[in-house]
Structures are given as structure tokens and as C-alpha cells.
Amino acid sequence: MEKVTQEVYAKIDNDYYKGEGDIWWQPDSMLHLLKTSLNPCRVGYFKKVLHKLAIDPQGKTALEVGSGGGILTEEVAKLGFTTTGIEPAEQSLNTAINHARLSGLTIKYDKGFSENLPYPDQSFDCVVCCDVLEHVMDLPKTISEISRVLKPNGVFYYDTLNRTFLSKLVAIKIWQEWKRWAFMPPNIHNWDMFIKPEELKTLLAQNKLDWKEHKGTSPSVSIPKMLGYLRKRVKGEWGYAELGKNFQLKESNDMNIFYLGYAIKQ
């Protein structure tokens, strides 16, 4: 894996996260699906990892890289970590700050990029990076920076999208492009920036991160039922709130579209 070219990077719409207003916490917004459809799976798996490693979050520090509006950051903080989030989109950052304050959560938020984390070496016991690796221009530098700020034996927890025929069909065509079912804006993802598990494992090894495990995810309903749900939203019978209540991802062994994993800093 190398830094993507400007031509490839220009095809992904990362400006979406700079949108005005709260595009994260409103129940009928697309990004709120991260809370309803993805977080139960990703937080559940993260808890399993912490249990497996016998890590008590109390007194430990965690950084979320690409914290967006704070939807996952708040879950990390609720586990007991002293939590920091870093995010380049100022509007999303302001949303996260305001929501944490209203929720009574103490979370430190900073503006910055994954390729240049403004923290000293060995600052955190855990780094979380979800829905982000497939968005960055310089993935090798991002992994290098994450390793740098992790303490020895610290945990790097992540998820991302696999670059397969099936992920192009589902995550790009059905979810983004084909108007009959699409529920995401066009160009929110670029298939050329998706990451194969073996590519990521190589980058981890090159940066003193000892890869431990990958797990896949699958829809909680059958594919025909999922398409039916997406069609209901397109036709106006459902909003994102109803979609989130009825459609989630669950942990599985199928890594063709989306996968989670963790590594330990050597």
C-alpha cells in the first residue's frame, strides 16, 4: 500500500463531513446509522477484545482517530477510558464537542489529521480508528503515526472496507450509486481506496504493530430483505431512523465487504 494519488483522492467526497448543522446525531440523518446499524457490532467486538486482553479501561487513555461527530468516541468514553478524539472537519468537531457537553461526558477533542497526530510518542493505551482508513490519502503515514502515539503493548482497534468484487457491488453500487436502493451520498467512498486485509496486515507489521485478528460482518437480515428495506427508504415509506431500527451489521466470518480487527504495539 502506498499513498494514493491526487487523482484517486479527488474522487472521494470527504467534504461531506464539513456540512453545516448536526449531520451526526439527528435520528433521521444518514450518519446516525453509524450509531444504530454499526456501533452495536463494533462496540460489542471491542468489548470482547478488551475482555480477551484483560484490559480495564479505567485509568487508561484512548484516542479515536477521525472522530467525526463523536458517535463512537462517546461509546469509548462510556467504557471508562480517558478519551481524546481528533477530527479534521471543524463542523463535525463542533458537533462532537457540543454533544459531549450536553451528555455530561468529559472528552478532549482536537482538530487535526491522521497523517500528523499532534501528540507525543507513546501517549495512549489504545487507538481506535473506524470508518476512517479507507478515507485517508496517506494510509502508510496514518498507520505509522498511530503506532508512534501508542504505548508499548497498546491496542490498535480498527475497521474498514475490503476491496473485493462484492464490496464494489454492495458498498458502492447498491449503497451509493443505484438510485433504486442507494442510501449514501455518491462518492462518500471510493472503491480504489478500500483495503484488503493482507495489505493492512503488511502495513501493521512494518510499523511494529503485531496483528492479532480479523472478523467480518454480515447484514442482520437476508439480502432480499435488506434491499426491500432500502427500497422503502427510497420510496419515502421509511426514513433513516426506521432503517436503523431494522437493519444492523453483525459479527461474522465473512470479510468480503467490511471487517474489524486489532493489533498490539510491540
Image (tube, helix red, strand yellow):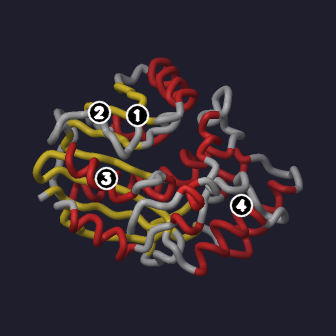
- Return the disc, 2 or 1, that comes first in the chain's sequence: 1
- Please report contact status of discs 2 and 4: CB closer than 8 Å, yes or no: no
Q: How far apart in space, not on screen, are marks 3 and 1 (Cα)?
A: 27 Å
Look at 38% across and 73% down and name the residue there.
197
The type of residue carrying mark 1 is Gly
User: Where does residue 80 sit, x and y in percent of width and height?
Assistant: 27, 35
Q: Amino acid at mark 2?
A: Pro
Q: Earlier in the sequence, mark 1 or mark 4?
A: 1
Q: Quadrant of the N terminus?
A: bottom left
The amino acid pointed to by label 4 is Gln
The label number, if any, that marks residue 112 in the structure image? 1
Q: Are marks 2 and 1 in contact (CB under 8 Å)?
A: yes
Task: Please tell me whether mark 2 sits on a helix, a strand or a loop.
Answer: loop
Q: Earlier in the sequence, mark 4 or mark 3?
A: 3
Q: Residues within 10 Å of mark 4 (few under 14, many from 20)?
A: many
Measured from the top left, where is residue 47 in percent x and y?
31, 52
Above or below — where is 68 with respect to 178? above
Which residue has dot 3 on it? 47
Left or right: where does residue 132 sit relative to residue 124? right
Report whether 214 appears left or right of 70: left
For residue 118, which numbered disc appears in the image? 2
